[in-house]
Amino acid sequence: MIGKTVSSKGRILPFVVLLSALLIWTVVSSLHVFPESVFPSPLAVARGFVEELRTGRLTDDIVASLFRVTTGFGLAVLFGIPVGLWLGNHARARTAFLPLVNFFRSLSPLAWIPFAILWFGIGDLPTVFLIFMASFFPLVLATVAAVANIPSVYFRVARDYRFSSREMLLNVTLPAIAPQVITSLRVTAGLAWLVVVAAEMIAGRAGLGFAIWDARNGLRMDLLVCGMIVIGVIGVILDRILLQLTKIPSVRWGYER
Amino acid sequence: MNDRPLVVDNVSFSFGSVGVFERISLSIDRGEFVAVVGPSGCGKTTLLNLFSQFIKPDSGRVMCTERVRMVYQTDSLFPWQTVRENIELGLRSLTDKAERTRQLGEMLKLIKLEGFANHYPHQLSGGMRQRVELARALIGDSDILLLDEPFSSLDYLTRIRMRNELARMLDKLPRTVVLVTHDIEEAAQLADRIVVLSDRPARICSEFYVELARPRELTHPTVVTTVHEILAELGLEHEGRQATLQGVAQ
């Protein structure tokens, strides 16, 4: 019974905090400590939100940003995990390539913006490229580390029970690295979402980052805050979606041990 | 059918410059339960690896004529598979699905985990996991069971229970067994023959035979006497005390 009370309280707490933050925001803006042009009220932001929805711009921007993140991040997963698996299984290749992978991982993806614009112009391509660069290297490293951490006894057992090479990969390596890879997917997806906003500010013609930049240029702080809120909410939703992967029964061992 | 399914004959083996065995010979009879004890790092696990042909000797001959299964010192159940899936690995060669289900059901009953078929290893206690490890190794067609300190990670009481479990399982599913252990009590309580190895490069110091049916009480005079004899052989106990205890046992 006690557990149930704590659990329902736990569910309410985030809403209490959010409502309190909204209340503080309303009070501060109603006191006019800062002018409306630099500190928009919640009401102004809500009106801006409705306006953006009516014109369809907000939906277009959300779709544009999500498309870029999905493409860039999807490509990073598609190439990053196999490369990580390959490096994880080949000691010489690992020794040869790991310093380079580490170098690019340490490089802020935003440093690529000038090249992205030079090579791909303005639009979807440079942003997808930047997201790929932001996600690919951390994913490779996380996969390499996960492969290196697989206890050798699992391969010994697989050999005892005469697993083929394909079974070793599909039934030992992949399930053994799944919990660590899922955690790194959550981290890199968050990174990709951060990068898309920054990239669109400079190399975009649409998208939530571009919308924020556009609002700033038009001195529409209400729309700017509206964009910020949407970005934050979508970031949380994306993480929640990926969090569902950790609930798959066959990966729970990685989080509960 | 060979009456000695496991033989190492005049085998030498070294890890680089570290000699592990120098012309060691040991043969195991069919259905025999042999325990190998000795100082830490003397090559007990290496001996099992030679038997399972995971490693090859530098010289000499290793013969293993039957199907071998091994239970490892570390937790070797696949954590992403359920108890059922882990045990079913031992039935991979069996294509008849109904027969697989039947054998699996029987095994779950034997290890008293009928209600845990769909649990994952991390949801089980150490003793339960070890029972699943034994089940995976014993199910299906295997003849030889190699046990590499299988109970070393368990607490003392669970270890004693697991010895009885193993004896009970082997009574139902007889196998030729080689048990490597640092636990002299375990060896004396379970094995028909106990082989004592010396320090590296290991040689066989002595062999003890225990002619007593399993399961054996830990405090049975024969078990206690054997423990003392082995400890004396390893230089860990005085001969005089051993002789006194033998007198008490009689």
Image (cartoon, coloured by chain):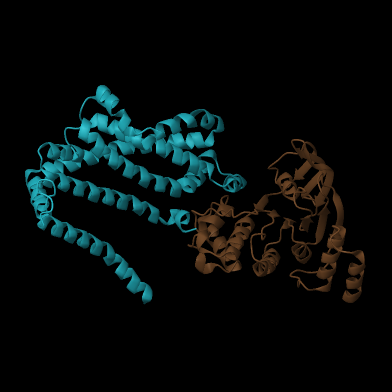
| Residue B233 x, y percent position in the rendering | 87, 58
Q: Is residue B143 left or right of residue A249?
A: right
Nearest the camera: B233 or B133?
A: B233
Q: Give the brown chain's letter.
A: B
| Residue A212 x, y percent position in the rendering | 17, 40
- What is the tally of numbered marks visible in this picture? 0
In the depicted structure, whether residue B71 falls above or below residue A94? below
Q: Is residue B104 left or right of residue A185?
A: right
For the question of whether residue A70 can be seen, the reply is no
Q: Which residue is rendered at x = 20% and y = 62% of the image?
A: A19
Res. B151 image quadrant: bottom right
For the question of whether residue B239 can be seen, the reply is yes
Q: Which residue is rendered at x = 84% and y = 46% of the image?
A: B25
Q: Is residue A122 left or right of residue B44?
A: left
Q: Which residue is rendered at x = 81% and y = 69% of the image?
A: B223
Nearest the camera: B72 or B26?
A: B72
In the depicted structure, whether residue A126 falls above or below residue A175? above
- Looking at the figure, which quarter contains the N terminus of chain A? bottom left
| Residue B120 x, y percent position in the rendering | 49, 60
Q: Is residue B202 left or right of residue A89?
A: right
Nearest the camera: A150 or A12?
A: A12
Furthest residue to the front? A33
| Residue B78 x, y percent position in the rendering | 53, 53
Q: Which residue is rendered at x = 53% and y = 41% of the image?
A: A148
Q: Colour of chain A?
A: cyan
